[in-house]
């Protein structure tokens, strides 16, 4: 669990500062044959966010469900509190954010 917590923190720190290279390296889709390219990873950064904190982690074998809370910048509404649930996967002993590729 500590290894996963470190990866989550690194991923969200990178996302908040728009560090696409680090974000890409932590995505499961960046692995060989998984279809994510660095230019496509730019679209994964999504809306601006800040103050993201891990609330809950549930590990089930090689998958983990993670619940996060943070603030998201939504147009004229400004910074809005939001809860997010995401999936992480364990591949070759390393945790990766599960990539959801758009077709």
Image (cartoon, rainbow, N blue to C red):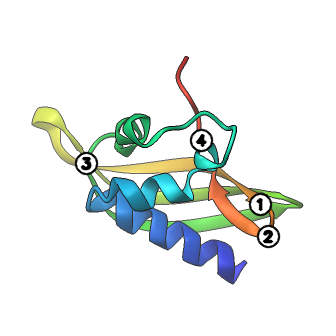
Whole-percent x and y of residue 83?
A: 47, 50
> Above or below — where is 23 with respect to 43?
below
Tag 2 residue: 93
Which sits earlier in the primary sequence, circle 3 or circle 1? Answer: 3
Q: Is residue 50 left or right of residue 63?
A: left
Q: What whole-number distance in Å separates the C-alpha atoms at marks 3 and 2?
A: 30 Å
Disc number at residue 90? 1
Question: Marks 3 and 4, Cα distance to the nearest angstrom?
Answer: 18 Å
| Crowding near the residue tagged with mark 2, few <14, some 14–19, many ≥20 C-alpha atoms within 10 Å | few
Lower position in the chain sequence, tag 3 or tag 2: 3
Q: Position of residue 26 (x, y in %)?
A: 55, 59
Mark earlier in primary sequence (1, 4): 1
> Residue furthest toward the front?
32
Look at the numbered disc 3 and give the secondary structure of its residue. Answer: loop
If the image is split into quadrants, where does the N terminus sit? bottom right
Disc 4: CA contacts within 10 A as few (<14), some (14-19) or many (>=20): many
Distance CA(mark 4)–CA(mark 2): 17 Å
Percent x, y of residue 3: 67, 79
- The local crowd at label 1, few if under 14, some if 14 to 19, many if 20 or more residues have their Cα within 10 Å, is some
Q: Earlier in the sequence, mark 4 or mark 2?
A: 2
Residue mark closest to the camera, 3 vs 1: 1
Give x and y (percent) for residue 35.
60, 33
Q: Are marks 2 and 1 in contact (CB under 8 Å)?
A: yes
- Residue at image position (26%, 62%) is 17
Q: Nearer the viewer, mark 3 or mark 2?
A: 2
Tell whether 102 sits left or right of 43. right
Q: Which residue is mark 4?
A: 99
Which residue is identified by label 3?
Answer: 48
Going from N to C along the chain, the mark reached first, 3 or 4, is 3
Query: Is residue 62 toward the left or the right of residue 36 in the image?
Result: right
Secondary element type, mark 2: loop
């Amino acid at each position: 669990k500590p290894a996963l917590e470190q990866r989550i923190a690194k991923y969200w720190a990178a996302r908040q500062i728009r560090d696409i290279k680090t974000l890409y390296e932590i995505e499961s889709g960046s692995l060989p044959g998984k279809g994510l390219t660095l230019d496509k990873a730019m679209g994964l950064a999504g809306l601006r966010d800040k103050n993201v904190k891990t609330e809950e982690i549930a590990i089930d074998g090689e998958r983990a469900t993670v619940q996060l809370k943070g603030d998201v910048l939504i147009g004229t509404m400004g910074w809005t509190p939001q809860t997010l649930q995401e999936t992480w996967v364990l591949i070759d002993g390393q945790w990766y954010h599960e990539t959801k590729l758009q077709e």
